[in-house]
């Protein structure tokens, strides 16, 4: 039967509250989950894992769950109360994707949640779910649209516009593989902090602890942990600064930047400092790094993270590069990294809520901002120095088109061949034009685009 714990302490009740907040909040799923962990310290490891599995699972498969629910509902699905929709999504996700929880207990808990949150809907929830148990979901799930793209969208739980965009551009097979890759639960990938330990030392220590860990193939700094147990903060070596959470693709960005000791470096949109820490480590902690972001809360967290990692020489600075006046950052930089804000369509596997938050017009909106940032930051690059542009998306408007437009306006910049700085296993990712493109349809990594540009002696600029 259902849980006898108070509703506020039950993992399903907590998951429901998070899904409701996600529908109305501007917080991303990962930030929302971080606040939830802090707000519910009573959760043990098992319950915490269940909350994460429920929330991420519902977001990953939301439109497919909605399709099933709508097939059994006695009223139009869009007219159902938003909280009731989330109660049913939670129950259907457990029925379809989890096999450790008895079906009657799932239904009982869902009805209890409805009685607690939307009492008038309890009978509706009970009737729909018992109908699902009685008739099964095979017929509903088998009723796919005849149009192959619409069928792909429903089968893989992707928005129709995004499935159509990928299928039209890259073909139906590639679009399917990309959608399927995004629906697989990604492994926990870490970057070993060279300032505190070597990958070999960390691997040996973790294997001694009985952890299932293995080095990444493409990045020489990466490590994958299969089936991690507990929060990141409980992993051996966290307090000692042995690692940061960072996907293998993201690790290649700083390797493409190839920072050197003694350089002045600008990490222009530093966020929480994942790449800031890597830049410092690659430069042997002997570079001057200006870490700028417009979010002061992220900068405060970055400062704490740099201390944990043993990083020195980082100057956090609150800056919006698209607002005047520009900050006084000195005479220019030997290296500028622009890890630009983007649509994030390459990292849906880690952020499944992006599927439902993004709109087609967001891609072009981000592209305009990315090009504007490139043009502003170009003036911060010394002659002979490098500007590295990276985004966690593969959309042409945010990748090739941004670079083409920038080079058309700034002929004093040109693409540098990346093979000289990237590790050899990453050379397969380099395209003929010198850009790097990582597609989750083909690689077990996040989707990324990156390019290294060098500023030459001044030439006539085009307006």
Image (cartoon, rainbow, N blue to C red):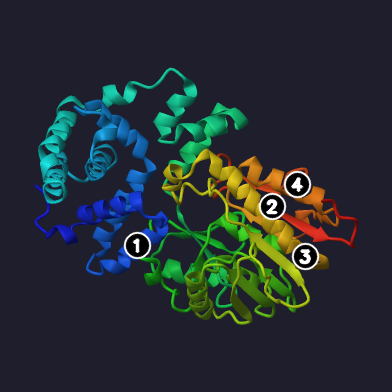
Dot 3 and dot 4 residues touching (CB under 8 Å): no
Q: Quadrant of residue 183?
A: top left
Q: Which residue is mark 4?
A: 405
Tell me if label 2 and label 4 are in contact, CB under 8 Å: yes
Q: Residues within 10 Å of mark 4 (few under 14, many from 20)?
A: few
* In contact (CB < 8 Å): disc 1 and disc 2: no
Q: Is residue 361 above or below residue 235?
A: above
Q: Is residue 304 among the parts visible in the rendering?
A: yes
**Badge nearest the viewer, 1 or 2:** 2
Residue 250 x/y as whole percent: 59, 57
Query: Which label number is shown at residue 371?
Result: 2
Q: Position of residue 67 (x, y in %)?
A: 31, 30
Q: Quick one: 250 or 367, which is closer to the camera?
A: 367
Residue at label 3?
Answer: 379
Secondary structure, mark 2, is: helix
Residue at image x 71%, y 59%? 388
The residues bearing labels 3 and 4 have C-alpha atoms spaced at a distance of: 16 Å
Q: Check disc 3 and report its element: helix, strand or loop.
A: loop
């Amino acid at each position: 039967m259902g849980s006898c714990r108070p509703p506020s302490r039950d993992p399903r009740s907590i998951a429901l509250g998070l899904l409701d907040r996600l529908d109305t909040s501007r917080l991303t799923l990962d930030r929302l989950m971080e606040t939830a962990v802090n707000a519910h310290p009573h959760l043990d490891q098992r319950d915490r894992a269940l909350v994460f599995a429920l929330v991420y699972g519902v977001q990953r498969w939301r439109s497919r769950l909605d399709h099933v629910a709508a097939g059994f509902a006695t009223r139009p699905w869009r007219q159902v109360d938003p909280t009731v929709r989330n109660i049913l999504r939670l129950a259907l996700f457990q029925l379809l994707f989890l096999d450790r929880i008895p079906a009657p207990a799932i239904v009982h808990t869902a009805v209890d949640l409805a009685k607690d949150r939307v009492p008038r809907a309890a009978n509706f929830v009970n009737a729909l779910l018992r109908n699902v148990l009685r008739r099964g979901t095979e017929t509903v799930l088998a009723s796919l649209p005849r149009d192959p793209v619409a069928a792909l969208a429903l089968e893989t739980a992707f928005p129709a516009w995004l499935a159509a965009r990928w299928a039209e551009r890259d073909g139906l097979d590639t679009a399917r593989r990309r959608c399927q890759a995004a629906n697989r639960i990604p492994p926990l990938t870490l970057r070993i902090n060279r300032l505190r330990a070597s990958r070999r030392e960390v691997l040996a220590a973790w294997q001694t602890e009985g952890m299932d860990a293995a080095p990444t193939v493409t990045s020489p700094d990466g490590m994958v942990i299969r089936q991690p147990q507990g929060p990141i903060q409980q992993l051996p070596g966290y307090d000692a600064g042995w690692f940061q959470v960072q996907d293998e693709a993201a690790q290649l960005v700083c390797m493409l930047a190839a920072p050197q000791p003694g350089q002045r470096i600008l990490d222009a949109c530093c966020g929480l400092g994942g790449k800031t820490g890597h830049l410092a480590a690659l430069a042997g902690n002997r570079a001057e790094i200006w870490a700028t972001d417009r979010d002061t809360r992220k900068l405060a967290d970055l400062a704490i993270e740099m201390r944990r990692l043993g990083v020195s020489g980082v100057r956090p600075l609150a800056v919006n590069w698209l607002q005047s006046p520009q900050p006084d950052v000195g005479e220019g930089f030997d290296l500028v990294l622009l890890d630009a804000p983007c649509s994030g369509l390459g990292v849906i596997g880690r952020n499944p809520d992006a599927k439902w938050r993004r709109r087609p017009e967001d891609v072009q909106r981000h592209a305009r901002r990315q090009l504007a940032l490139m043009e502003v930051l170009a003036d911060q690059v010394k002659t002979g120095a490098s500007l590295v542009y990276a985004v966690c998306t593969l959309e042409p408007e945010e990748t090739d088109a941004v670079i083409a437009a920038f080079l058309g306006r700034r002929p004093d910049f040109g693409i540098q061949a990346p093979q000289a700085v990237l590790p050899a296993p990453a050379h397969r990712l380099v395209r003929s034009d010198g850009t790097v493109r990582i597609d989750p349809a083909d690689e077990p990594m996040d989707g990324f685009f990156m390019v290294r540009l060098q500023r030459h002696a001044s030439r006539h600029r085009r307006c």
